[in-house]
Amino acid sequence: MEEEQEWIREVLSGNKQAYGQIIDKYKNPLYGTILRMTRNPHDAQDLVQEAFIKVYEQLDKYKATGSFSSWFYRVAINHCMDQFRKKRHKQSDIDTEVIQDNRHPEVLFLKREKSRQLERLIATLPEDERMIILLRYGQELSYQEISDVLHLSLSDVRNKLHRAKKKMRKVAKREGGKYDDVSEN
């Protein structure tokens, strides 16, 4: 965290190259989160680039009193949500799962199917619950960090997370499948 603070100080003092360190640290996690939101690689790439520009433009507003990652995700996710509202974003049906492990074909198939099921279940959720699931399990943010990012109370975060998981279980059961708790993945 001290390293991030140093990068921020350097950027604010005019060293634009230091921003590359921030981009390197957050580009993949942010892309993964936005890809799950949009389900479209091209849109996700565009939104990631726009989000990094937005964060850069607002970097002087960051107060070192809280975690930089929470502030970063709040700015980036808020930008994405604004874009969704403007465009009434339509999701495309793509397979985002890339499996690197090429050991046993049956194991790979089961992993891929489990991931697809989870992606489908997450896609059935309302936007606010989907965001909480993605921030909690995709980015591994704490409840407090999610609360800060989404401007929700801690109890709202917990309640929405609980409701989201309950809805996912219900949909999986209705489809005749098995729901594995997100926290196990």
Image (spheres, rainbow, N blue to C red):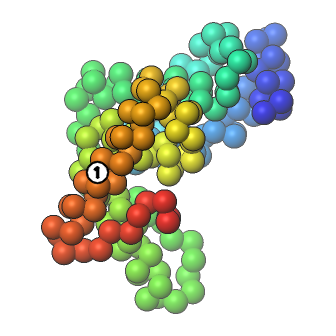
Q: Is residue 2 found left or right of 42 in the rendered image? A: right
User: Is 56 drawn above or below residue 185 in the view shown?
Assistant: above
Residue type indicated by callout 1: Ala
Q: Is residue 147 found left or right of 64 in the rendered image? A: left
Pinpoint residue 134: horizontal percent, then vertical percent: 44, 46
Q: Which residue is mark 1?
A: 123
Pinpoint residue 4: horizontal percent, then vertical percent: 77, 29
Pinpoint residue 31: horizontal percent, then vertical percent: 51, 43
Q: Quadrant of residue 78?
A: top left
Q: Nearer the viewer, residue 137 or 51?
A: 137
User: Is 87 drawn above or below residue 177 in the view shown?
Assistant: above
Q: Quadrant of residue 10?
A: top right
| Residue under the point 47% across and 81% down | 108
Q: Is residue 112 found left or right of 146 in the rendered image? A: left
| Residue under the point 84% across and 24% down | 6
Q: Nearer the viewer, residue 122 or 19?
A: 122
Q: In the rendered view of the protein, which quadrant contains the N terminus?
A: top right
Pinpoint residue 42: horizontal percent, then vertical percent: 40, 42
